Image (cartoon, grey):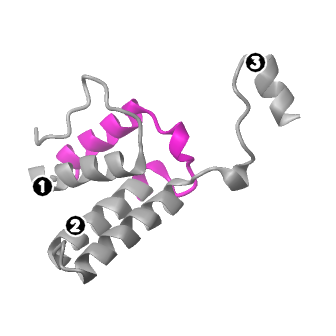
Amino acid sequence: MRVRDDLEAGRIPQPPDGDRLTLLRAVNAFLTHKKHQVETGELSGRSFGLYYTTCEQLLRHLGKTVFVEQIRPDDLLRYRRRMAGELHADGQCLRSCRQIANHLGLPEQNKDTHWAAP
């Protein structure tokens, strides 16, 4: 039924939910990679802490169960604005967001999505 609905709507059928990558799974893989870098001396514990906090905030903002392929540049722009305003994030924190987004394969930011500090 799901596949037929997608085909009739002119969309490419999506894989079953169990095969799709959630933001939580992607973030956990990213943090595991960064933890390994701390263990090998490639990354400081302070930087890991920043990544961890940023990932927690990203999960709170977008949701743990959102599928990575559903995240759009506008979602990231709203998150970036929230970080810059409400959370008073500095340039280093915003750069960590960009690195996380790139690592997770999140969609390319459009021309209005600037990850540098405001």
Location of the C terminus by quadrant is: top left
Q: Position of residue 115 (x, y in %)?
A: 20, 40
Residue placed under numbered mark 2 in the picture: 50
Q: Position of residue 107 (x, y in %)?
A: 41, 35
Q: Give, as a three-letter code, the residue at label 3.
A: Ala
Q: Is residue 69 left or right of residue 92?
A: right
- Asked if residue 71 is positioned above or below residue 92 in the image, the reply reads above
Q: Is residue 90 left or right of residue 36?
A: left
Q: CA distance from mark 3 to mark 1?
A: 43 Å
Q: CA distance from mark 2 to mark 1?
A: 9 Å
- Asked if residue 108 is positioned above or below residue 67 in the image, the reply reads above
- Asked if residue 43 is positioned above or below residue 4 in the image, the reply reads below
Residue placed under numbered mark 1 in the picture: 92
Q: Position of residue 97 (x, y in %)?
A: 26, 51
- Asked if residue 4 is positioned above or below residue 42 in the image, the reply reads above
Residue at the image point whose x is 43% and y is 57% from the top: 59
Q: Viewer-proximal residue, 76 or 13?
A: 13
Q: Which residues are magenta?
A: 60-87
Residue 75 counted in the magenta span: yes
Q: Compare marks 3 and 2 and give the one earlier in the sequence.
A: 3
Residue 30 counted in the magenta span: no
Are the two marked residues, 2 and 1, in contact with CB atoms closer than 8 angstroms?
yes
Are the two marked residues, 3 and 2, in contact with CB atoms closer than 8 angstroms?
no
Residue at the image point whose x is 35% and y is 51% from the top: 103
Q: Compare marks 2 and 1 and give the one earlier in the sequence.
A: 2
Q: Give, as a three-letter code, the residue at label 1.
A: Gln
Q: Viewer-proximal residue, 77 or 25?
A: 25
Q: Which mark is residue 9?
A: 3
Residue at the image point whose x is 11% and y is 42% from the top: 117
Location of the N terminus by quadrant is: top right
Residue at the image point whose x is 76% and y is 26% from the top: 6
